Image (spheres, rainbow, N blue to C red):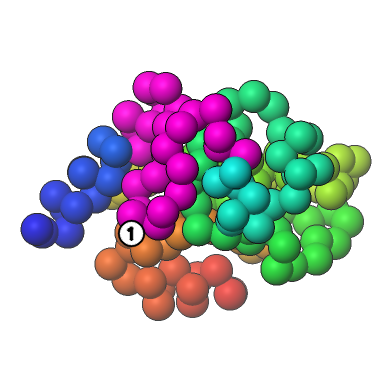
Amino acid sequence: MMEKEIKLKIKRDYGRIATQDGSSCCCNCNCVSDPSDLETVAERLGYSEGDIDNIPDGANLGLGCGNPLALLALNEGQTVLNLGSGGGFDCFLARERDEETGLVIGVDMTPEMIELEIEHLPVKDVIISNCVINLSKDKARVFREASV
């Protein structure tokens, strides 16, 4: 399968997950597919019960491959760019950490973002991603630009 076809399939799959019943699992990771049990998926990805309870309904799509916020400490006033933000799960959690002066920007898979392949975004404080960088054919470039 060619790169463009792979990206279109992923986009269709994520679109289906976002617009249908909320069932997840696009990665053969043995997570649950029952939409009533998305909390279990989030727990398996490393989110706490408190994290899960503090996000709006619909933000937990059961996607991703971990908890990127568990790996960093945010400083007051930082801007967080979440690549592949989906329903906003990590965005809401990042915003909780600095509601007064911080800024959280969520970018998800749109035709324009696929074309850009997330390599030309101007935010430099904190960038998190929950697996979407895997869709870039030039991962090294993503990391170079993120570290400037």
For residue 12, say whether it is visible. Answer: yes
Which quarter shows the C terminus? bottom right
Q: Is residue 23 above or below residue 68?
A: above
Query: Residue 104: x percent and y percent?
Result: 69, 44
Residue at 35% x, 47% y is 26
**SS of the residue under disc 1:** helix
- Quarter of the rendering containing residue 100: top right
> Magenta stretch containing residue 148, yes or no?
no
Quarter occupied by the N terminus:
bottom left
The magenta stretch is 14-39
Residue 9: quadrant of the picture: top left
Residue that appears at 49% across and 73% down: 143
Question: In the visual, does 75 lie left or right of 90?
Answer: right
| Residue 62 percent across, percent down from the top left | 51, 42
Label 1: few (<14), some or many (≥20) within 10 Å?
Answer: some
According to the picture, the residue beneath numbered tag 1 turns out to be 135
Q: Is residue 1 left or right of residue 124?
A: left
Q: Which amino acid does label 1 sit on?
A: Leu
Residue 135: x percent and y percent? Answer: 33, 59
In depth, the one of 64 and 44 nearer the eye is 44
Q: Nearer the viewer, residue 19 or 45?
A: 45
Q: Which residue is drawn at 78% across and 35% down?
A: 54
Q: Residue at x 84, y 53 (%)?
A: 77
Residue 103 in view here: no
Q: Does residue 37 belong to the magenta stretch?
A: yes
Residue 105: where, in percent of width, then height?
Answer: 63, 43
| Figure quadrant of residue 140 | bottom left
50 or 9, which is in the foreground?
50
